Image (cartoon, rainbow, N blue to C red):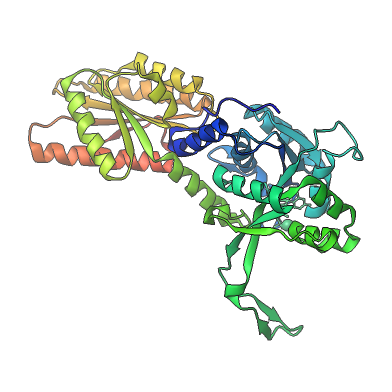
Amino acid sequence: MERHESNSELPVERQHEDCLSRSTQERCPVNFSVAVVLPAAGSGERTGLSTPKQFCKILGRPLISYTIHAFERVCWIDSIVVVVAKESHDMMADILHKYNHTKVKLVEGGPTRHRSILNGLLAFSETGVGPKLQKPKVVIIHDAVRPFLEEDFLLKITLAAKERGASGAARPLVSTVVAATAGGYLDYCLERAKYRASETPQGFIYDIIYQAYQQCSEAEFKFGTECLDLALQHCGTSAQLIEGPPTLWKVTHKQDLASAEATIKESLSQSACIISGECTETHDLSTCMKSWLTAAGMRVDAIPNTERSMTLSASRNVIKLSVNSSDFAEIREIMKRCEESKDFLLYPVIILWVFLNVSDQVTLRQENDEASTIMNLAEEAKKINIFLYGVQLSYSKVSTQWERTVNRLCQLTMALIRDRNDAFTGQMLQA
Ligand code: CTP
Ligand code: MG
C-alpha cells in the first residue's frame, strides 16, 4: 500500500501534530487500509442560516475544508469520500480544487444521514454505481461538521475498530437526560454517570458496517441516528467506546461557528517570528518584544533577516521591524516566502510591519508615504491570504516612556494576531 511521504504543510503552531505524523510514518502503526466517509449532505436547519453549516466560512475557508484537512494530513489514510447533496456538488468540487484536497472523492447524499453514509460506503462496493475505490479494511465515519480531530485519537479509534469490529468516540454527558410524558411532564431521569454522548469519529471493519446497512429497515434509515447501534443490532458487533477529547464537538447552532473560529484563531496565535534587521535599535526592540510575548505565552523566534526561510515559512505570524525608512523589498520577500509555503491558502498569515522612528527627522510626507505604501501592499497581500498591518512608534530615551510604548506595541501585536481581523489590514496604527 502506498504511504504518503510528507506532512510539511502543517503550520508551526501544530508542530506537535507534525511530529506525531512523522513518528507515525517511521513506525507506521497501521498496516491495513483505512478510508474515511464524511457525511456532508445535511441542510443545517438548526443554525437558522441559508448556507448549510459545512460550507460556512471560517477565516475565509469553508468549515468542511478544515475537516478534510484533518484527515488528509494523516499519512495512513488512503481515501476520503465526501457525501454532499446534489445541488452542492459543484461548490464542493470548487472547494476541493481551491484547497488542493487530493485524497477526496465526491458522492451524492441521501435524504437522511444514514442514507448519506450508505451512499458513501457504496463508493467502495461493487454493487454501487459509478467508479469504485479500493475497499478498505477499516472505514472511519465522521461528521463533516466536527473539524477538530487529532491524529492520535483517530489512531485509537482505527486500531480498536480493527480489533473489535467497531469503535466510537464517547463523551461524558453535560446535562442529565430526562424523558417527558406526552403532556410535557417529567416521566423519568437517566442516571447521568451511567450514560455517554456518542460522537464521531466511529470506526468499523468495512464488511461489518456494510452488512449492517444492507439489513437496515426503512424506519432505521428514516429515524435512526447511530451507526454503532446498526453494527450491534444487525451484526452482533458491540463497539468499543473510547472517551474522546472535548474538541470533538459538532457545529450544530449558529454560535458554534463563532466558537470554531475562536478555536482556530487560538491555535494560530501560539507562535511568532520577529525579523529585526541588523541595526541596534531594532535588535533591542526585538529583544523587548520577544520577552513580552514569551511571557504572554507565545513561542517567539527572533531572527535578524528573512534568510532563515524554514522558520519563516512555518510561522503564521511574522513581525518585521524597520527603522524610519520602509523595507519595502523585504516585506515583498516575506510575502513571497509565505506564498511558497504549501499551506498558504489554508490559514491566513499575519505580517505586522513595525516602523520605529529613531530620530525627529521623520516628515509628515514620509509618514503619508508609508501609510499609502502599506495600504496598497495590503490589498495585494490579501489576495494571497496574508493580512498586513502597520504600526508606528517613536524611540524615547526616557526609559519609562519607552517601556510604555513597547508595552502598547506588544498589546497591539497580540490583539492583531489573536483577532486576525481583515478589516484592519492596510492600516497604519500608532503605538
Ligand atoms: N448529513 C448528511 N445527510 C443528511 C443529513 C445529515 O450527510 N441527509 C450530515 C450533515 O451534513 C452533518 C452530519 O450528517 O455533517 C451530522 O448531522 P447534523 O449535525 O444533524 O447536520 P444537519 O442535518 O445538516 O443539521 P440539522 O439537523 O440542524 O438540519
Ligand atoms: Mg440533522
Q: Quadrant of residue 187?
A: bottom right
Of residues 2 and 376, the one nearer the viewer is: 2
In the depicted structure, whether residue 186 falls above or below residue 260: below
Of residues 240 and 182, the one nearer the viewer is: 240
Tell which residue pokes out farthest to the left in this image: 398
- Answer yes or no: is residue 431 visible: no
In the depicted structure, whether residue 414 falls above or below residue 50: above
**x and y percentages locating residue 107 in the rendered image:** 80, 39
**x and y percentages locating residue 401 in the rendered image:** 12, 39
Of residues 203 and 303, the one nearer the viewer is: 203
Tell which residue pokes out farthest to the top in this image: 329
Q: Quadrant of the N terminus?
A: top right
In the rendered structure, the answer to whether residue 255 lies left or right of residue 401 reads right
- Answer yes or no: is residue 350 visible: yes
Which residue corresponds to the image point at 37% horizontal and 24% vertical from the top-left?
374
Q: Quadrant of residue 198?
A: bottom right
In the rendered structure, the answer to whether residue 340 lies left or right of residue 207 reads left
Count of number-bearing discs:
0
In the depicted structure, whether residue 190 falls above or below residue 9: below
In the rendered structure, the answer to whether residue 325 lies left or right of residue 112 reads left
**x and y percentages locating residue 161 in the rendered image:** 69, 50
Locate ligand 2 by image quadrant.
Answer: bottom right
Q: Quadrant of residue 298?
A: top left
Which residue corresponds to the image point at 45% horizontal and 38% vertical from the top-left?
16
Which residue corresponds to the image point at 35% horizontal and 18% vertical from the top-left?
306
**x and y percentages locating residue 263 in the rendered image:** 48, 48
In the rendered structure, the answer to whether residue 168 lies left or right of residue 123 reads left
Of residues 160 and 394, the one nearer the viewer is: 160
Q: Quadrant of the C terminus?
A: top left
